[in-house]
Amino acid sequence: MKKPIVSVSWLKEHLDDADLIILDATQKVNQAKVESQFDGLQIKGARFFDIKNDFSDTTNPLPNTLPNADDFAKAARKLGINKDSKIVVYDSLGIYSSPRVWWLFKIMGHSTVWVLDGGLPAWIKEGYATEPTHQSNYIKGNFESKFNPDLVKSKEQILENIHNKEAVLIDARSSDRFSGETEEPRVGLRSGHIPGSINIPYTNLLNDGKFLPKEELAKILPQHNKSLLFSCGSGVTACIDFIAYELIGNNNPKAVYDGSWTEWGQIESLPIEK
């Protein structure tokens, strides 16, 4: 499977695979202000992947930032994840935070990871087995991180790109936030966007919690002969746009600006456009 997503029917057929691990990447609070209809439920056998705490750099004042490779590996081993594990990750909104987890594993050198298209809502719609959410202890895994720095960018690199224009920066926020027509949901941030960036709201790429078909995505996503950089509010929904480009077969180098607008929007010396 080269595609970064799998269907709920595929997952149902492979539930008994010995090396399969299902991760629940649901976030209790999200900046999209969307509430899940399935609080307290998880796919049977799923393990909770705590983006906010176990798999973020909690010493960084910015939210959801990339942890270092050693800390990521320790947290993954605690979840019972091995070097040869096949990982399917989902969230309770369909497609929201799960692509971030896909990217995290990719940047840590783990290739056998997929996002469940449609997530928990699609799983439940098919009548497949769920259970109440609960914490468990797992046999410690042997996961090892092999960090790939090419998949992440810093504000300094984004600032440099404004001048050299070597890459295209894609902002996954809503169009009203991108244009500065509405205030940012996080207090204290300026409104607008990074100069030279283009806006592809992640919501335009989804329908009913699933990615649009490849043909429809190809009509929405402009093709460029440059590297692609992705930004959003805090580095979560940027990964939705990242995967969408993967789905249409775009092989350009890609990376996420991890600080995203939460970082850029609070630093007065950094340029913005509206």
Image: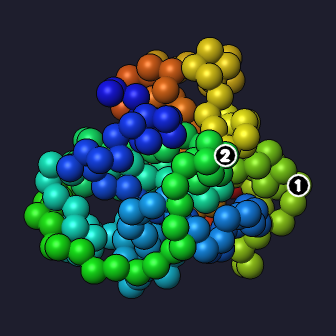
Q: Amino acid at mark 2?
A: Lys
Number of residues whose C-alpha sits closer than 10 Å to that of mark 1, classed few (under 14), some (14–19) or many (20 or more): few
Marking on residue 254: none
Q: Nearer the viewer, mark 2 or mark 1?
A: 2
Q: Residue at x 22, y 67 (%)?
A: 80
Q: Residue at x 49, y 49 (%)?
A: 99
Q: Is residue 106 left or right of residue 60?
A: left
Of labels 2 and 1, earlier in sequence is 2
Q: CA distance from mark 2 to mark 1?
A: 37 Å
Q: Measured from the top left, where is residue 41 in percent x and y?
A: 58, 68
Q: Residue at x 55, y 49 (%)?
A: 128
Q: Which part of the image, by quadrant, shows the N terminus?
A: top left
Q: Secondary structure at mark 1?
A: loop
Q: Measured from the top left, where is residue 129 in percent x and y?
A: 52, 55
Farthest residue to the bottom: give it.
59
Query: Above or below — where is 32 with respect to 137?
Result: above
Specify whether residue 69 is in view: no
Marking on residue 181: 1
Instruction: Provide the residue designation for mark 2.
Output: 125
Q: Amino acid at mark 1?
A: Glu
